[in-house]
Amino acid sequence: MHTIIKRALWGVLIGGGISLLGAGVAQAADTSGEDGLLSGTQAILDVEAPVTVAGNAISVLGDSHSDDADTQAPAAAPAPAPAASTSGDDGAAAGAQAIVTVEVPVTVSGNAVSVAGDSHSNGAETSSGGSSEPAPEASTSGDDSVAGGTQGVISVDAPVTVSGNAISVLGDSESTDASAGTTGDDTSGDHTAAMTSGDDSVTGGTQVVAPVDVPVTVGDNAISVIGDSESTDATTGTTGNGSGDTAGTTNGDDSLLGGTQVIAPLDLPVTVGGNAISVLGDSESTDASTGATENGNGGDHTAASTSGDDSVAGGTQVTAPIDIPVTVGGNAISVIGDSQSTNATTGTGGGSNGGEAVTGGSDSILGGTQVLLPISLPITVGGNAISVIGDSETTSPSTPGNSGDPTDPTDPVDPTDPVDPTDPGTPTDPSTPIDPAIPSTPVTPASSGDPVTVTAMPASTGTAVALAATGGGVTPWAAGLGLLMLLGGLLLARRRATIG
């Protein structure tokens, strides 16, 4: 009997769960929290991690060989879900939403890896990753609310491409004519365009837009621990443009701390290609070509618009695009052995174009304030030959890019004239020493019971000893000065006696 009841309850639970799941799934993320408390809030999480591993030769004992490996580009992401829309009108902390998109395409192909033996990779080609369709705009509203209509749009793209590398622990490593495709342009800006409103609210309509792009390309590197490393005709494709439009629009008219937004796109393209690295043996890199990191669309992906008319500290925004393209290509590094880099070409890394921001704060208090902080740090390291024990040689490195006109040297400052030393002061005459006082005779303690007898002692005993006179004799004017001082003392004593 108990078994039948248990199975019946399990059936009801499973059937109810399926019914609720079917009713809860919808194509559009649409919610409302009007006139509610902490309602209308939603979180949308989209995580994509396509991983491609093809054309790799891996050996523990023996030789590894990879020839003409071709990796197709990952298929484009499916069509995005409809736009996320929420409302928190006339609510308290309602209508808030968080949209988090994470894309991590990883491609590993055309690599030859060997532990004991030779590694050889020839003609490896990796296609660029496909671009996904832009996601629709996110929209939320927090009119006439308290902390309503707040949203956070965070997009993280980290395409990683590893192709055409020859890695060996014991043996020789050789990589020839490897080609790593470009990392496709990211369209994160389109799917992070956000719009929110906080009219007539308190801290309503606030949003944070933070797209993060970290494209990493590692191609045609020859790495060996014991043996020779050789990289020939390495070609590493360019790292595509960073995030696209991340324009954020918010409104905080007639509000308190409403319509505030922070837009902080972060682009970190890293390209490492055409490097020959050896611990014991010779390292050689020939005709390495590392593509340029293209300019980031700073003006497009950080264009922001906000309004704080007739508000208090409303419509404030901070736009801080950060671009740090790093390119390392055509380097030959050896610990024990010779290092040689020949005809290395490293493209320049373009910085951000800056950002256009528009804000309004008419008839407001501390409204419409904005801070623009574009930061660009292009770093290029190419055509270097580094050796600890052995010879280092680099031939005809080419790193394009204008260094700018040098500044004219400034005129040296004339030294100041030395200050004249001050005259020493006149030393003062030494004063006459005072005669030492004659010590008194101590009183003998009386015995217990006997009366104490006080005996008068003379003022001085023996012959007074005077100090030896120094200098000349006493002059008449000194005697007159002494008489005047004595007379003054007598007059002062008489005056005190009269007053007393």
Image: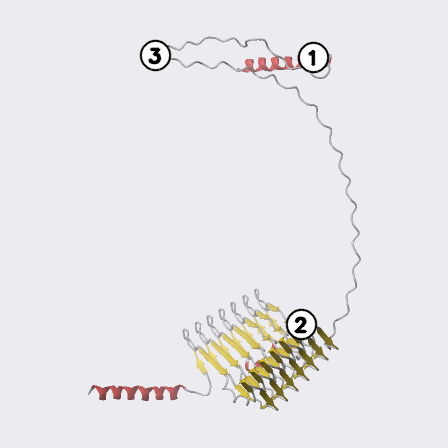
Residue at 75%, 71% in the rendered image: 404
Instruction: Choose top left, top right, bottom left or bottom right for residue 275.
Output: bottom right
Three-letter code, disc 3: Gly
**Quarter of the image that includes the N terminus:** bottom left
Residue hosting label 2: 387
Residue hosting label 1: 479
- Nearest to the observer: residue 157 or residue 224: 224
Residue 42: x %, y % from top left: 44, 78
| Mark nearer the N terminus (1 vs 2) | 2
In the image, residue 284 above or below residue 12: above
Q: Secondary structure at mark 3?
A: loop
Residue hosting label 3: 449
Q: Secondary structure at mark 2?
A: strand
Q: Are marks 1 and 2 in contact (CB under 8 Å)?
A: no
Residue 361: x %, y % from top left: 59, 69
- Of tags 3 and 2, the one toward the viewer is 2
- Nearest to the observer: residue 437 or residue 405: 437
Residue 428 can be seen in this image: yes
- Nearest to the observer: residue 348 or residue 263: 348
Residue 78: x %, y % from top left: 52, 89
Residue at 66%, 21% in the rendered image: 431
| Mark nearer the N terminus (3 vs 1) | 3
* Circle 1 residues within 10 Å: few <14, some 14–19, many ≥20: few
- Give me the C-alpha separation between circle 1 and circle 2: 97 Å
* Circle 3 residues within 10 Å: few <14, some 14–19, many ≥20: few
Residue 352 can be seen in this image: no
Instruction: Choose top left, top right, bottom left or bottom right for residue 460.
Output: top right
